[in-house]
C-alpha cells in the first residue's frame, strides 16, 4: 500500500485554532458529515468516535498495519496517519461506503466466496486496498496483489485466500473467466 | 451434565477409519438415544460442505461490531499507567493531581496483579501497600476521562515513588545461582480457563521452579546403553508475542443490578467467572458479551488486569468505561509464548527404534510460570526409557499466556529435528523412520501414516537430495515434521434450540466465534438434522447468558459443540416428526428431514414444507437442549471440564526452503500441510485455519523475536513495524490436504485443527534447512545472524 500524501486545502480560511474542538465538515461516502473535532484528531478517530463509522479499524495507530485504510480522492491512505482537518474538501470513502446502493463490491463478494477472512479485524482495510487495485487494474497479477496488501498485516494468516479472492474479483471485472 | 458413565448404554455398530483408505466396522457402547451415526461426508447434505462463513458479510462490510467498536452513551475512555521500571517496591502513589485534571471522572490503583505467579507464602509482601513491580510495563493504575486524550494527559500527573530492586531479564542470566530473584520465595501459578498454570507445590530455588518430570519412565541409563546411535542437541526458541490485530480490551458498564462487560475474549464465561471472583458478585449479576473478537491465539482469557481496572473505574464513575490496550501494552502486558532452552539427547537402535529420550528444558514466561515444552518428547513415539526435567525460569518480563499449541510448538521444533538427526545418522529416510517408529495404537498415528504418504507425493519427496547438495551460495532443501495435539473435549457444553411455529430456528450456546467459523459449523450441524440450509439457522453465541459453551482455545470448540448441537437438533427433529406424522398418515420413524421438507422416507411425495408442517401441527415453540456427552470410549485423562482423549490429532507438514548462505536469509518457498480433524464439518474453513497455522508457523520460525533491553527491561520492539510478522511478501505457496477420519467417538466425530496446524511448521522448515545446507539450525528465529552462526558451527 502506498500512503497518499496531501497538500492540505483550505488552511487559509482556518487561521490559528485549537486546542478546543471546533466544527469540522468532511465529505464522507458522498455526504457532508459535520462534527466537533480538535486539531489533533486523526481521520480514523473522526470517523469512528465522532461519526460512529466503526468499520475502519485501528491496529497500530502508526501506519504499520493498514487496518485503517480508507480512500482519499480514490487513493488508499492510512487514516490513522491523516489529520482530519487536512482532508477537508477531499472525498473520503470508507468500508461503509464501498458497496454502492447496497450492492457489494466484487472484491467483497470474492472475499466471502474464497473465505479471505477469519477474525475479520484486518478485513475492512484489506478490502479497501484490494478493491482499489481491482478498480484501477483489472488485469492485476499475483505480484500486484501482494504489493497492494504488502503494508497490511493479518495475524490469522488469510493472505493466500486474499490473493485468490482478489484475482478472482479482478477476473470477473475484466470479463475473464475465473 | 451427562456422561456415558451415568447413562444407560446400548451397543452400536460404528464405521471407523479414514474415508477413501480403509473403513472398519466396530461395536461400541453408546448412550441410549444417541443419534444414529452419520455416514461419510459425501452422503450428507450440509455437513462436510464448503458453506460460506456465516459472518463473512458483516466482516467485509465493516458491520461486524468488535469490542473495539462498542460505543455506549456517556462512555468514558480509560488509559493505563504502566511501570517504568523492571523491579521495584512502590512506596507511594499520588493520584490527586490526575483526579483534578480536565475531563477525568475516575482514577483507580490496582490492588492485586493477576496473570503473574503468586508467592506461596506472601510473607512481608502481604503488608505492601501496592503490588510489587516485577516487569517494566506492569499495570499500576488507570484513569477514565471523557476522551482518550484527557485520560492520557492525566496519567502523566500520577506520581509513583519506586524503590528499585535488582532485576534480571534474560533466561540464562536468571538461571545463575547469584541472579537477582524475581520472587523472594516459592510460587504457584493458577490455571485459567485457557489452560496455562503450572504443577502445584514444585520446589523453587532462586528463579528456577521445578523440576517437573511429566512423562518420565523406565531406566534412562539402560536406554542409552542399548542405543546404537545417540544424538544430542541444545535447542533455543525465542519469546513470541500473540499480536492479535484487535488488542485486548473491554467496555465495562457497572450498574447496581448488573455488571455488563463487552470483552475481546476467547471465552465469555471466563470473563464472567473471573469478574465474579474479583468483585465478589454472583455470576448471575454479570453478563459478558463478545460478538466478534479480533484474534486471540491463546492470550484472551479472563478479565485481566485491564478489565479489572475498567470495572473499578466504571463503578466509581457510574458510567460505561472503554479500556482498550494500545499496541505497546498489547506486546508487553497480556501474554507471550515463553522462550525455551532444550537440551535433548535421544538414543536409537540401528533399525530406528528409540531406546532413550532425555530432555532437560528451561523456559521463561517472565513473571508467570507455565513455560513447559509440551508433551511430544514423551508421547509421540513409543520409547521405554524417558527422562524429563523441566524448569520454569522467572525473569522480570511480562507474563506468558497460552499461545497456539502452547509448549508443543517449542517442543516439536527440537524433537522433530532430533528425530531427523537420528534418521540422518542411521542413513534412514526421515519418512521411513517415522513409518517405523510412529506406531502407537491411536487415531493420530493412523492419520499421520496416510498424511506422510500424501505429503510425500505432493512435495515430490523423491527429488529430495543429500543434505547440502547445492554447490553455489544459494541452497535449496526439503524437510518434513510431524504434528500432534491432544483431542480435547469440554464436557461443560450445552446447546439449546428454539424452534418457533413459523419455522424459525434459533440455536444458542455460550461459546464464541473468534474467527474460527464456530457460527458456521454450529449452523451446518443443526441444518443437517432439520433438513434446512445453514443460513436458515439463527446462531447465537458470545453471551454468558447462553447455555455453557467451551473456550475458543485448545482446538476444542468444534469437538465439544457439534455433538451437543447435533443431539439437540436430532431430538427436536424426532419431536417434530411425532407431531407431524399424523398429518401425513405416516409413522414418525419413516419421516426424514431434507431439502427444507419433512417427507416419507420411501415416498417423497408424502411431504410437507418445514414451516408448513410446524404450522399445521400447531406447534408454538419447541425447546430442545442437549449436553456434550462423553466420548463413546471415554477419556485418557480428565481435569475438571477438560477431557483428553487417548486419541490425539495428527498432521504432517513439508517445507521447501531456500537459504542464501552468504546473507543468511532463509526463504520458505512452499509448504504442504496434510491434516486430520476427525470429520471436517466445513472443509473450506478448516483449510483457512490450516493456512493460518502455517503462516504463523513461518512467522515464528523466521522472524518474530521479542527483544528486551537488559538494563531497563523495556521491550525494544513494541510495535508491528518493529516486531516483524509475516506479511503478503513472506507468505509462501501453501497447499492444504485434508483427510476425513471417522473416529466413532461422538455423534459428529469432529475434532479441532487450529493448533495441530501450527506446531510442526518451524520444525519442518528447520529440517528443510538441514537438507539444504547440511547444518542444523538450533536457534529460532532463523534470522541472518542465527543462520550465519549455524552455518559457521562445527
Image (spheres, coloured by chain):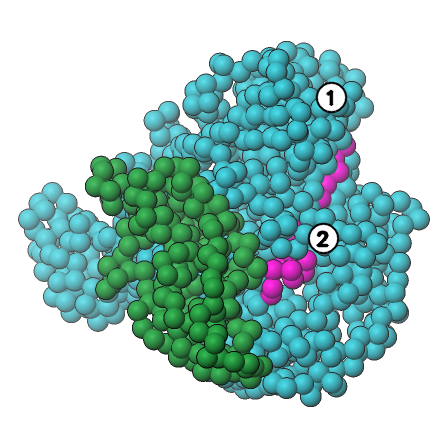
Chain colours: A green, B cyan
Query: Numbered disc 1: what chain?
Result: B
- Residue range in magenta is B325-346
Q: Nearer the viewer, residue B411 or B318?
A: B318
Q: Which residue is mark 1?
A: B231
Q: Which mark is residue B716?
A: 2
Image-based side of B592 in relation to A37, left or right:
left
Q: Residue at x 38, y 34 (%)?
A: B740
Q: Is residue B344 above or below residue A17?
A: above
- Find residue B356 and report its horizontal and vertical position in percent: 73, 24
Q: Is residue B132 above or below residue B436?
A: below
Q: Nearer the viewer, mark 2 or mark 1?
A: 2
Sequence order check, earlier mark of 2 and 1: 1
Q: Which mark is residue B198?
A: none
Q: Are marks 2 and 1 on the same chain?
A: yes
Asked if one can make out residue B32 in the rendered structure from this viewpoint, the answer is no
Q: Is residue B756 above or below residue B74?
A: above
- Which quadrant would the C terminus of chain B be assigned to in this image? top right
Asked if one can make out residue B270 in the rendered structure from this viewpoint, the answer is yes
Query: Numbered disc 2: what chain?
Result: B
Image-based side of B22 in relation to A15, left or right:
left
Q: Is residue B682 above or below residue B771?
A: below
Q: Nearer the viewer, residue B126 or B470?
A: B470
**Circle 1 — which element?**
strand
Amino acid at each position: 500500500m502506498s500512503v497518499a500524501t496531501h497538500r492540505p486545502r483550505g488552511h487559509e480560511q482556518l487561521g490559528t485554532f485549537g486546542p478546543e474542538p471546533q466544527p469540522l465538515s468532511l465529505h464522507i461516502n458522498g455526504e457532508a458529515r459535520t462534527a466537533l473535532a480538535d486539531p489533533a484528531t486523526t481521520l480514523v478517530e473522526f470517523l469512528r468516535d465522532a461519526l460512529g463509522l466503526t468499520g475502519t479499524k485501528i491496529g497500530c495507530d502508526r501506519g504499520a498495519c493498514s487496518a485503517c485504510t480508507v480512500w482519499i480522492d480514490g487513493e488508499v491512505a492510512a487514516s490513522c496517519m491523516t489529520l482530519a482537518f487536512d482532508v477537508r474538501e477531499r472525498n473520503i470513502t470508507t468500508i461503509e461506503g464501498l458497496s454502492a446502493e447496497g450492492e457489494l463490491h466484487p472484491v467483497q463478494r470474492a472475499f466471502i466466496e474464497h473465505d479471505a477472512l477469519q477474525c475479520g479485524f484486518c478485513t475492512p482495510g484489506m478490502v479497501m486496498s484490494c478493491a482499489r487495485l481491482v478498480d484501477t487494474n483489472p488485469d492485476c497479477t499475483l505480484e500486484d496483489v501482494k504489493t497492494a496488501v504488502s503494508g497490511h498485516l493479518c495475524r490469522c494468516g488469510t493472505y493466500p485466500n486474499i490473493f485468490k479472492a482478489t484475482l478472482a474479483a479482478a477476473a470477473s471485472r475484466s470479463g475473464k473467466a475465473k | 451434565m451427562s456422561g456415558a458413565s451415568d447413562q444407560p448404554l446400548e451397543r452400536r455398530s460404528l464405521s471407523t477409519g479414514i474415508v477413501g483408505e480403509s473403513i472398519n466396522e466396530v461395536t461400541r457402547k453408546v448412550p441410549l438415544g444417541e443419534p444414529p451415526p452419520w455416514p461419510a461426508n459425501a452422503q450428507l447434505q450440509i455437513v462436510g460442505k464448503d458453506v460460506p462463513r456465516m459472518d463473512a458479510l458483516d466482516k467485509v462490510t465493516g458491520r461486524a461490531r468488535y469490542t473495539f467498536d462498542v460505543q455506549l452513551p456517556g462512555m468514558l475512555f480509560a488509559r493505563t499507567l504502566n511501570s517504568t521500571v523492571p523491579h521495584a517496591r512502590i512506596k507511594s502513589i499520588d493520584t490527586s493531581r490526575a483526579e483534578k485534571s480536565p475531563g477525568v471522572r475516575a482514577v483507580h490503583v490496582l490492588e492485586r496483579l493477576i496473570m503473574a505467579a503468586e508467592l506461596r507464602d506472601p510473607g512481608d509482601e502481604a503488608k505492601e501497600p501496592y503490588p510489587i513491580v516485577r516487569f517494566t510495563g506492569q499495570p499500576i493504575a488507570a484513569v477514565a476521562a471523557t476522551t482518550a486524550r484527557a485520560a492520557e494527559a492525566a496519567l502523566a500527573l500520577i506520581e509513583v515513588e519506586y524503590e528499585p530492586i535488582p532485576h534480571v531479564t534474560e533466561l540464562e542470566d536468571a538461571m545463575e545461582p547469584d541472579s537477582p530473584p524475581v520472587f523472594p520465595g516459592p510460587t504457584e501459578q493458577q490455571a485459567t480457563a485457557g489452560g496455562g498454570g503450572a504443577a502445584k507445590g514444585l520446589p523453587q530455588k532462586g528463579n528456577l521452579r521445578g523440576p517437573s518430570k511429566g512423562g518420565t519412565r523406565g531406566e534412562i541409563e539402560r536406554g542409552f546403553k542399548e542405543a546404537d546411535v545417540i544424538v544430542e542437541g541444545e535447542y533455543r526458541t525465542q519469546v513470541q508475542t500473540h499480536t492479535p490485530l484487535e488488542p485486548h480490551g473491554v467496555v465495562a458498564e457497572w450498574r447496581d443490578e448488573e455488571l455488563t462487560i463487552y470483552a475481546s475474549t476467547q471465552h465469555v464465561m471466563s470473563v464472567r467467572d473471573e469478574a465474579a471472583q474479583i468483585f465478589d458478585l454472583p455470576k448471575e449479576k454479570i453478563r459478558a458479551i463478545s460478538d466478534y473478537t479480533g484474534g486471540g491465539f491463546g492470550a484472551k482469557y479472563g478479565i485481566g488486569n485491564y478489565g479489572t481496572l475498567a470495572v473499578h473505574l466504571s463503578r466509581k464513575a457510574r458510567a460505561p468505561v472503554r479500556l482498550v490496550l494500545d499496541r505497546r501494552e498489547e506486546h508487553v502486558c497480556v501474554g507471550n509464548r515463553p522462550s525455551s532452552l532444550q537440551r535433548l539427547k535421544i538414543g536409537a537402535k540401528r533399525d530406528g527404534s528409540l531406546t532413550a529420550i532425555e530432555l532437560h528444558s528451561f523456559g521463561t514466561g517472565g513473571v508467570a510460570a507455565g513455560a513447559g515444552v509440551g508433551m511430544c518428547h514423551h508421547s509421540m513415539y513409543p520409547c521405554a526409557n524417558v527422562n524429563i526435567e523441566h524448569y520454569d525460569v522467572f525473569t522480570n518480563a511480562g507474563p506468558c499466556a497460552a499461545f497456539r499449541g502452547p509448549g508443543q510448538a517449542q517442543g516439536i521444533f527440537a524433537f522433530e529435528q532430533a528425530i531427523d538427526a537420528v534418521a540422518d545418522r542411521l542413513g534412514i529416510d526421515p519418512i521411513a523412520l517415522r513409518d517405523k517408529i510412529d506406531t502407537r495404537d491411536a487415531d493420530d498415528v493412523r492419520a499421520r501414516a496416510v498424511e506422510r504418504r500424501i505429503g510425500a507425493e505432493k512435495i515430490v519427496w523423491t527429488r529430495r537430495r543429500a543434505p547440502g547438495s547445492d554447490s553455489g551460495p544459494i541452497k535449496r532443501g526439503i524437510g518434513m515434521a510431524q504434528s500432534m495435539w491432544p483431542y480435547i473435549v469440554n464436557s461443560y457444553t450445552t446447546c439449546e434450540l428454539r424452534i418457533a411455529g413459523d419455522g424459525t430456528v434459533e440455536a444458542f450456546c455460550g461459546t464464541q466465534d473468534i474467527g474460527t467459523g464456530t457460527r458456521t459449523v454450529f449452523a451446518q450441524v443443526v441444518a443437517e438434522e432439520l433438513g434446512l440450509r445453514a443460513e436458515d439457522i439463527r446462531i447465537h453465541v458470545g453471551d454468558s447468558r447462553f447455555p455453557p459453551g467451551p473456550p475458543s482455545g485448545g482446538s476444542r470448540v468444534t469437538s465439544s459443540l457439534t455433538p451437543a448441537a447435533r443431539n439437540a437438533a436430532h431430538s427436536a427433529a424426532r419431536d417434530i416428526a411425532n407431531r407431524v406424522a399424523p398429518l401425513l398418515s405416516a409413522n414418525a420413524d419413516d419421516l426424514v428431514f431434507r431439502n427444507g421438507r419433512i417427507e416419507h422416507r420411501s415416498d417423497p411425495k408424502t411431504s410437507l414444507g418445514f414451516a408448513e408442517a410446524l404450522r399445521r401441527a400447531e406447534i408454538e415453540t419447541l425447546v430442545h437442549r442437549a449436553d456434550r456427552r462423553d466420548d463413546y470410549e471415554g477419556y485418557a485423562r480428565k481435569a475438571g471440564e477438560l477431557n483428553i482423549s487417548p486419541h490425539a490429532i495428527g498432521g504432517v507438514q513439508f517445507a521447501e526452503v531456500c537459504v542464501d548462505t552468504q546473507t543468511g536469509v532463509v526463504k520458505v518457498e512452499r509448504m504442504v500441510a496434510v491434516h486430520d480433524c476427525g470429520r471436517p464439518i466445513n472443509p473450506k474453513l478448516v483449510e483457512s485455519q490450516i493456512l493460518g497455522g502455517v503462516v504463523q508457523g513461518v512467522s515464528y520460525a523466521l522472524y518474530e523475536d521479542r527483544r528486551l533491553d537488559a538494563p531497563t527491561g523495556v521491550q525494544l520492539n513494541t510495535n508491528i513495524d518493529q516486531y516483524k510478522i509475516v506479511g503478503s511478501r513472506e507468505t509462501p505457496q501453501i497447499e492444504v490436504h485434508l483427510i476425513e477420519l471417522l473416529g466413532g467417538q461422538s455423534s459428529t466425530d469432529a475434532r479441532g485443527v487450529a493448533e495441530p496446524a501450527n506446531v510442526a511448521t518451524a520444525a519442518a522448515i528447520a529440517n528443510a534447512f538441514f537438507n539444504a545446507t547440511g547444518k542444523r539450525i538450533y536457534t529460532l528465529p532463523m534470522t541472518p545472524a542465527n543462520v550465519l552462526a549455524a552455518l559457521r558451527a562445527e
